[in-house]
Amino acid sequence: MKQVVYRNYGDSDVLKVEEVDKPEIGKKNSVLVKVSNSSLNAIDWKNRKGNFRLVSGLFSPKTKQGFDVVGIIEEKSNDVEHFSIGDRIVALLGNRTGGALSEYIVLKTDNIVKISNEIPPKQVAGIPMAGITAWLALMKLGGLKKNDKVLINGGSSGVGHLAIQIAKAYGAEVTSVSSTKNLDFCKKLGADFTISYQDEDFLELPSTFDIIFDVVFNASYHQTQHLLSQSGIYIGTTPTANMIKELIRYKRAKFVAVHPNKEALQDLMDLMHEKKLKVAIDKEFLLSDIVNAHDYIEESRTVGKVIINVEDVLNPPVLSRIPE
Ligand SMILES: NC(=O)c1ccc[n+]([C@@H]2O[C@H](COP(=O)([O-])OP(=O)(O)OC[C@H]3O[C@@H](n4cnc5c(N)ncnc54)[C@H](OP(=O)(O)O)[C@@H]3O)[C@@H](O)[C@H]2O)c1
């Protein structure tokens, strides 16, 4: 089977699509999934460059590429009761493993969720890492409630565009910060107020917020605390030295650390089913075109998500980028 492999850290040309052995199903609690789609996340190019070596491997990469899996169960171990051969599933892989950019993968059933035939697999593929990050930040760390005022810094990003929709689905009032060209995109996703970072500094807004989700992470708790309501929470996405200092010092500074979470993934699938959540697909690439896909996502100008089509047969035509 084909798999994206890399043996050294570096530019995108370290990525190769190679023929490797198809994995064998485990004896217990295990399914073999034929992967149809995945998506790229910022961590994929950051891992490839060796930015997170404590997790991905100190001297050479130990983790594999890709964390978002959508596919069909082809085999299962005898003890698996709640999943059947032929089920469509979605899963997020752990940061220490990866391996979604592959024709087949063996998964434990603990964190996989069935997907209905009504939602196109390409759409679902954009959800696991970006959606779970947004969900954990807003719902778990932020404790989002109806009528909360939420600011999302980076509303057009993979994580941010899902965060806008999740916050709206749970009844919040959303202000999003993006470039001027993406104001309309964020508005169509449901943002009540849209601010261009090219025209306005959100740090000077005369408002207060219950949650500031700093997706693009160019501020800090210290810089935003005057914008927080009395019990307001600031949530960052990158474990910098300053973020760690703030986590120790301030109770209302939080850091979101994404990890496989079935409750979040199931809720995100339910929101998709209720048509409250859609993935905006910026661009699609075939697995064989992984080098170009990495070059594209590394520019960090993606609007919504970049989808990787591992196997194209299952998918309906390309969806429009901006959700209706
Ligand atoms: N801690 C965790 O568990 C976790 C999980 C997932 C992601 N992350 C991190 O979260 C960050 C976002 O990830 P992502 O996948 O959503 O990134 P992404 O999709 O690659 O972000 C690109 C988007 O950011 C926008 N952007 C760039 N500069 C901006 C600015 N100054 N203000 C507002 N928007 C700006 C770009 O729009 P314009 O070009 O129009 O500006 C583009 O739409 C990354 O640093 C990633 O590593 C952390």
Image (spheres, helix red, strand yellow):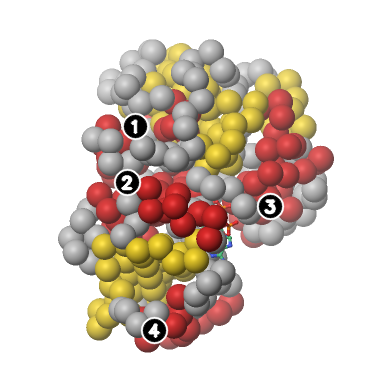
Separation of disc 4 and disc 2 at Cα?
Answer: 28 Å
Disc 2 residue type (three-letter): Ala
Q: Is residue 77 visible?
A: no
In percent of width and height, residue 66 lies at 59, 39
Residue that carries the numbered disc 1 in the rendered image: 113
**Disc 1 or 4, which lies upstream in sequence?**
1
Q: In the rendered structure, which amino acid carries the disc numbered 1?
A: Val
Question: What distance separates the C-alpha of mark 3 from that of mark 2?
Answer: 28 Å
Q: Position of residue 157 (x, y in %)?
A: 51, 53
Dot in front, 1 or 4? 4
Going from N to C along the chain, the mark reached first, 1 or 3, is 1
Q: Residue at x 43, y 18 (%)?
A: 73
Q: Quadrant of residue 53?
A: bottom right
Q: Which image quarter is the C terminus in?
A: top left
Residue displayed at 32% across by 69% down: 211
Is residue 79 or residue 226 the one in the foreground? 226
In this rendering, is residue 39 above or below 196? above
Residue at the image point whose x is 22% and y is 53% from the top: 170
- Can you tell which mark lies on residue 264? 2
As helix, strand or loop, the secondary structure at mark 3 comes to loop
Q: Circle 2: is it few (<14), some (14-19), or many (20+) Cα within 10 Å?
A: some
User: Mark on residue 226?
Assistant: none
Ligand 1 shows up in the quarter that is bottom right
- Label 1: few (<14), some (14–19) or many (≥20) C-alpha neighbours in 10 Å: many
Which residue matches tag 3? 299
